[in-house]
Amino acid sequence: MNSRNILLFSICSLIWGTTWFVIKFQIDSTGPIASVFFRFLLAAIMMFVINVFFIKKTLKYPLANHKFFMLQGLFNFCLNYILTYVSEQYINSGLVALTFTVLIYFNMLGMKLIYKKEIYKNVIYGAIMGFFGIIFLFWREISNFSADKVTIFGIVIGIVATLFASIGNMFAYKNHQLKVPVMTFNAWGMLYGAAFSLIIGLIHGESFYFPTTPSFLFSLTYLSLFGTVVAFWAYQTLVGTIGADRAAYTSIISPVIAMIISSVFENIVFTPQLFVGILLCFFGNLLALKKPQKSDVAPRPA
């Protein structure tokens, strides 16, 4: 992987590694649907400003393109995040992070079935190594797992949220194929995502009260600017250059970064399990992002 892609991968991994900590300041102040609406509405406004005044790319596209903008917005910037926020109301963040690691497998399957992309063995092996790394990383949360109905429901919601994120990635890849700039299709997608969130919230009866506390305003600004505008620009650019399967490895690395941040701000003590988990995630990352060779193609099922 070239230096530009490494930089893009690092940007979205580092930023999303911090958002796990920042999100709680937002959802402590308002409901999950309203949180998603405010976040992506502000992000969409930022994206349109960047497009108009800095990039100066056209925002006019035919309805055929808006179909894919809308679908990406629905799955990437609405349903995915609403369900992720909801799942955190039922299970702890460690289990939520664990459910999100299946994004790699969903993306691999989607790229194979929809776009006929080969699945490389190094990506599969790296994803498996990263999965076990996450298990070690959140061993305390997993060992305290209680198979009651509430917990099972939270896990199912988390997996469905990840599935929706993967579906959104497939539409983002389609936008790449249609030669639409990342900043442009993300701007439209985030606007549609905010609109869908508003509709769902109104149907659900959610309050859209806008808190003005410093913690909420900081978290909203950070999540919109860095966690959404910057991180999704980097991630969706990666999807177009290295594929959704390899780009999805950010779902393994960001929880590692989140754990390191928690050790600083939330006094989490490093244990042997944490150390092993970080090593597995790190080496799995190197393996998954290694430039694949033709001989690395996974064998086709008989």
Image (cartoon, rainbow, N blue to C red):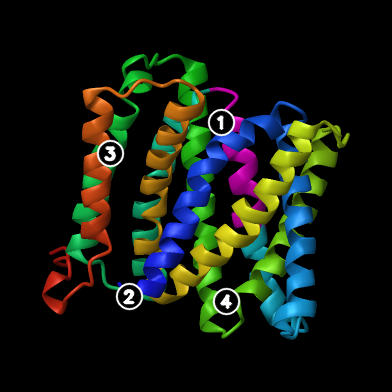
In the rendering, which numbered label is found on residue 87?
Answer: 1
The answer to whether 259 appears left or right of 173 in the picture is left
Towards the viewer: 209 or 9? 9
Amino acid under disc 2:
Asn
Residue at which label 4 appears: 175
In the rendering, which numbered label is found on residue 2?
Answer: 2
Q: CA distance from mark 2 to mark 4?
A: 23 Å
Towards the viewer: 184 or 112? 184
Q: CA distance from mark 1 to mark 4?
A: 29 Å
Q: Position of residue 28 (x, y in %)?
A: 71, 26
Q: CA distance from mark 4 to mark 3?
A: 34 Å
Q: Mark 1 or mark 2: which comes first in sequence?
A: 2
Residue at which label 3 appears: 278
As displayed, is residue 224 above or below residue 218?
below
Kindly state the secondary structure of the residue where label 4 is placed. Answer: helix
| Residue range (magenta) | 74-90
Q: Residues within 10 Å of mark 1 (few under 14, many from 20)?
A: many
Kindly state the secondary structure of the residue where label 3 is placed. Answer: helix
